[in-house]
Amino acid sequence: MNIKIIIVLMLLGTVSLSSKVMNYQEIYQKDNSAFKEVMGIQIKSEVKNHTKEIQNLYAKIGYQPIWIDKDQITHDAGVLLDEIRLDKNRGLFSSLDKIYETLLKEEQLFDPDQTLKEKVALEFKFTQLYTQYIDTIIKGQECDYTAETLIEHSLKKGSLIDGLNAIVKESKELDVGIKKKCQTTYRTLDKMYKILGHQPVWVSKSGLSVYATELFEEIKEDITLDKNGTAYKAYQTLFALEIPKENEKIVEFELAIAKLYKRYMEHLLYGEINWKQFQRDLKRHHRNAAWVTHDVVASPESLLVEAINTGSLVHAFEKAKPQLPWYDTLFTVLKKYQKIADDGGWESLPAFKTIKPGEGNNSMLPRIRERLSIEGDHINCSEITNAADYDACLLDAVKTFQKRHGLAAEGYIGKLTQKALSQSAEEKVAQIKLNINRMKWFKRDSERYRIFVNIPAFRMYVFDKQDQIQSMKIIVGKRRHETPVFYNRVHSIVLNPYWRIPRSIIRNEMVSKLKKNRHYLIKNNIELHTGYSEHSPRVNSLKVNWHKYRRKLPPYKFMQSPGVTNALGKVKYLFPNKFAVYARYQCKESF
């Protein structure tokens, strides 16, 4: 009984709410109708001050307002502005720029409390824009409509969209030509233009679109692009061409720019590394090494659609870029070394014996000073008395250089420092470009907190978005036991863990050591179990004949129990992966 009462009350409440909504809509419609009636009287009074075309247009529709409602601009006014924006971005109708920009500002400043006279003035401005827009579209074409009859048709259909769909904005020959070429000569572009409805994006009879201009400018300024490569040469060729007037040549020009866009966006998204070849070479030279790449979800086609929706290719260029720490830093450093290389780089140094801090009268030191000055490590000091002496100023410069190159910053200029000094500016540019290309294949995610391990630098970094919040030294693999490059999510943290020794270490290290010393497991606090649980039955390692195991693995599980001798230390960070790699806190100071 109570339930029924509640339901009835709920239904009554719904009826009441619906009634209020209906009342509001009726009131709004009445108010808006009254507003339109007053607007119509004012339009009829003032229309004589405008062109004959605008006078005829309003006469056909009974002087009713088209673009302005009581409290806002109409849906049709928004459609008109959006259509013109899209066409302007394609390089069309530049003659409308002034009145279009004026109306954009007035739309943003529109106030329901404006006077009737102000609203009528804005109505006429929209009509002026509309008539100029439609007249420009149908100029030189066979069309059944004029600006006057088209607005009448649109109002009958209920939307300006229906009216705009009834006329041809640009010759359909371009769309047909693009479709035909994509199915024959330019098949690689067919997917892109199917999404775009085979409409031109880059060029028209009026000239290059905003998108083509932005594409050319981006390619021109991109320092990662090979200036002798096919993409840059294609840009130079297309940039120098005059805009054709014949439809067939416009189609060819359109598709040539589209092909350039696709090639350039592939460069931005995927880089220039042949990963299949790289993986083969990696396995050939480092059998146990691995480098996992991650597919880039975005594509040239998807980014172009998004760019058209936003009105600019800048969106596509920004979205193609990996949102990773250091990516922008690499570009900054690349600009620096590219300029050094363009200016002639630095003089190559001959081989020389190790130079120690404090040495004097060494003919190599002035050349080393010059070399370090070009990279910015050496700054002229007032206390320099003899450039051939290894003074404190040069010592600071050498230490800075060594630290930047991951070397022991002790000031001794030995073989490793000489090797770093022997690298040319051109080689550094190539190395930076390589690392930029590598970063394009890192996992692209939106996680707030991320951990990066710089393997050759023996360092780990923790980031909060783009901000580095922690850095520490780490231990990584060595030759024949390289740390793989991969991505995964930290799953759990284990305190005082058992070390479940991987099969590869058992096969490559443990068995051979046990053949020499059967007490090896006991000495290193390693337990032998029948399973990987610490509660599984234990096996006495002294009773096992280790000499019978060569290629075949023993049927036991090796686990080092927690404690100060445990190789994992006190804490283990798990991120499940096929390489059985994890991070751990190492408490042994010897490491």
Image (cartoon, helix red, strand yellow):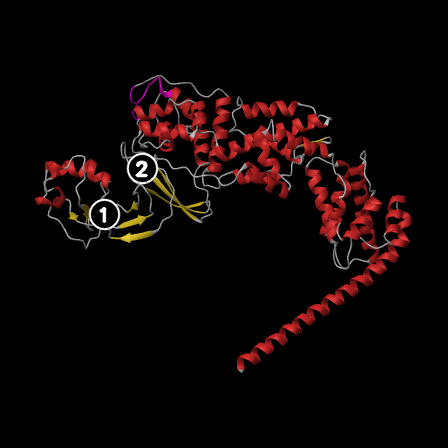
In front: 234, or 299? 299
Q: Is residue 366 left or right of residue 91?
A: left
Q: Which mark is residue 512?
A: none
Q: CA distance from mark 2 to mark 1?
A: 18 Å
Q: Do the residues under discs 2 and 1 have CB atoms within 8 angstroms?
A: no
Q: Residue 229 versus residue 220: which sits nearer the camera?
A: 229
Residue type, numbered disc 2: Thr
> Which residue is labeled 2 in the image?
483
Query: Under tag 1, what secondary structure?
Result: strand
For the magenta stretch, what is the residue range?
Answer: 353-365
Which residue is farthest left? 543
**Magenta stretch secondary structure, dominant:** loop
Q: Is residue 59 left or right of residue 410?
A: right
Question: Is residue 288 or residue 19 the one in the foreground?
Answer: 19
**Residue 151 % position (x, y):** 81, 48
As shown in the figure, which amino acid type bears the numbered disc 1? Answer: Trp
Q: Is residue 438 left or right of residue 459?
A: right
Q: Hey, which quadrant is residue 185 in on the image?
A: top right
| Label placed on residue 499 | 1
Of the 4 image quadrants, the one containing the C terminus is top left
Residue 419 is inside the magenta segment: no
Residue appearing at x 16%, y 38% in the figure: 511
